Amino acid sequence: MALLEIRDLHATVGNREILKGIDLTVKAGEVHAIMGPNGSGKSTLAQVLAGRDLYNVTGGQVLYDGKDLLELDPEERAQQGIFLAFQYPVEIPGVSNLYFLKAALNTIRKSRGEAELDAMDFLNLVREKMSLMDMDQALLNRPVNAGFSGGEKKRNEIFQMAVLEPRLAILDETDSGLDIDALKLVAHGVNTLRSPERSMIVVTHYQRLLNYIVPDFVHVLADGRLVKSGGKELALELEESGYAGLGIYDEEEAVGKA
Amino acid sequence: MSAVAEKVGSWLEEFTRQPKAEDRLQELREAAFERFSKTGFPTTHDEEWRFTNVAPIARKPWRVQEPGVRSQESGGLLAQLAKYAPQTNPFVALNTAFLSNVAYLHVRRGEVSEEPIEITHRASGDGAFHARTLIVVGPGAQCTIVETYEGEGQYFQNAVTEIVAGEGAVVDHYKVQRESAEAFHVATMQVQLGRSANFTSHNISLGAALARNDIGAVLAEGTEATLNGLYIVNGTQHVDNHTSIDHAKPHGTSHELYKGILDGKATAVFNGRIIVRQDAQKTDSKQTNKNLVLSDEAVIDTKPELQIFADDVRCTHGATIGQLDAESLFYLQSRGIGKSAARSLLTYAFAQDIADRIKIPSLKDSLERILIEKFHEHAC
């Protein structure tokens, strides 16, 4: 059975339709890359799956583990194993990383009927995952994402993912703004988390990330629809000829030319 | 006239009922009562009291009770009593008219008082309480004072605190107001600061049905004053903070940060006056008031009041009124934290930086506990 099944998904923000009928099936252990120009709806898809109420789903269906995903609150989705690595991780002054992550992990564990981790076990787990992401432990006592560099924020997202161990991870432009060293580090973190039980949707504008996180499938999203799907070679094809090679024009670039 | 007479009537009875005091005290009382008799209680027609209606206090005939602090030796401080608090304020006049037990505190020249000095004003039972505190800190001396206001039942606490700090003195003042939910709390604190003195006020307002704080500080040359405040109101609570920072001389610095959290139908007022006198060149002053409004029915009135007469100064002010950030809420929820726990966590976080400024570990811990109880019942 597929872990995630998206059928003819439509979503709007305000009066504007962003997703115009998405179909996508993700099985356990698969990594799907979704590529597309700016404004094609990539981030909307990621946020709709995580439950952001900014978007209205106006049609279609999303089944997660056979159940209706769209009925669930964002926290219920997280408790059932969905994780969104944010394109723009949110700064939360006044809440320490450590406190935040412990609250998150223990709420998720509790919802699954597992025992909460005590301070010692939690700290051991966190130290292990931090070294995976080569993160400074001092960051634990700093407020969530506040004053972090762009790269630190993205690493923090993957670090959170490593601690929370989701079944379905959605990475929303986790590569944007990263230099090559940070990109390799993030990719290494993600690759370590690949497993036959864990599925991933990797949303990206550029092919570069897919050199390091090699996907099983690549889909091209344009104007709210998946216009082309294929294997990892599709990403290389895009690298060669650009979106224009597929007859797709980047909204921003098009505006620039006009 | 009749309205004023009505208001003053029961107070006259109380005033004549109290036994006579020694000469100086009795003189202060009589002069003050005369002033109060003329003005009566302020109404919302008075600009200073526009958003705070004290009619529920004025209407009720209160029996005057002994303040919770036992009488102390004045140790030669009597001469300084009632010299600083503004006598034009009717509540200060009323407090002075009923001077009896005064909490005197004298930190002598150069003395460093390591342990925080705690003064607890406890109102036990109904009635009116006129807590009075005089703190005199000598030149170069250093101390930390914690004033706590608490009690049970419906009472009226009308407190006046005067602080005089000498040249180069360092004074940290904490006020924790956790009066009963039915109480009326009106408090005036006036601070006279010497040259190069360093004064910090932490004003934590949690309790009372109606609370009004008037905090005034007069700075001398090179004085540094920091005013931090946190007010948390819910239900039908009302809190009003009026602060006044008077830069009288050059090279003074003042930092003011007041934060409020409002829920239910609560109302709050912040009025921050900054005066920079003509002589007070090179003044550096910053005022910030931030409000987190958690319900649709809560109301905040915030107003900076800058009176600047010098030309070479830096004064900034800003006020914000906001709700919990939707994106932050979603971020927390997307990590599995339930909506109400996420709201509590963000609300707690809003107050965190005020808690972080508290330098007494035990007080910081107890405030954090109170914040967690108030906002955090659902989180982990």
Image: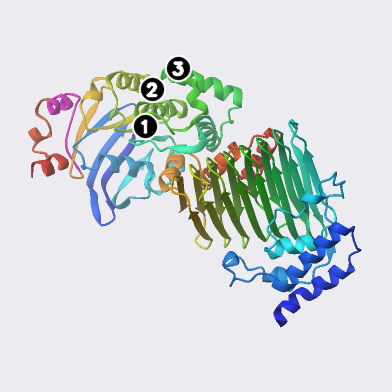
Residue A238 in the magenta stretch? The answer is yes
Residue A28: tell me if it is visible: no
User: Which of the chains bears the disc numbered 1?
Assistant: A
Label 3: element kind:
helix
Quadrant showing the N terminus of chain A = top left
Q: Is residue B346 left or right of residue B216?
A: left
Q: Which circle's residue, 2 or 1, is located before the other in the chain?
A: 1
Residue farthest along the front direction in this orientation: B279
Residue mark closest to the camera, 2 vs 3: 3
The secondary structure type at the circle numbered 2 is loop
Q: How far is the residue under mark 2 from the one under mark 3?
A: 14 Å
Q: Residues within 10 Å of mark 3 (few under 14, many from 20)?
A: few
Disc 2 residue crowd, few under 14, some 14–19, many 20+, Cα 10 Å? some
- Residue under the image location 31 percent in, 51 percent down: A57
Disc 2 and disc 1 in contact, CB within 8 angstroms: yes
Q: Amino acid at mark 3?
A: Ser
State which tag comes first along the sequence, 2 or 3.
3
**Which chain is disc 2 placed on?**
A
Q: Which residue is mark 2?
A: A193
Query: What range is drawn magenta here?
Result: A225-239
Q: Which amino acid, by three-letter code, is at mark 2?
A: Leu
Residue A131 - label: 3
Mark 1 / mark 3, whichever is N-terminal: 3
Q: Nearer the viewer, residue B281 or B297?
A: B281
Disc 1 marks which amino acid?
Ala
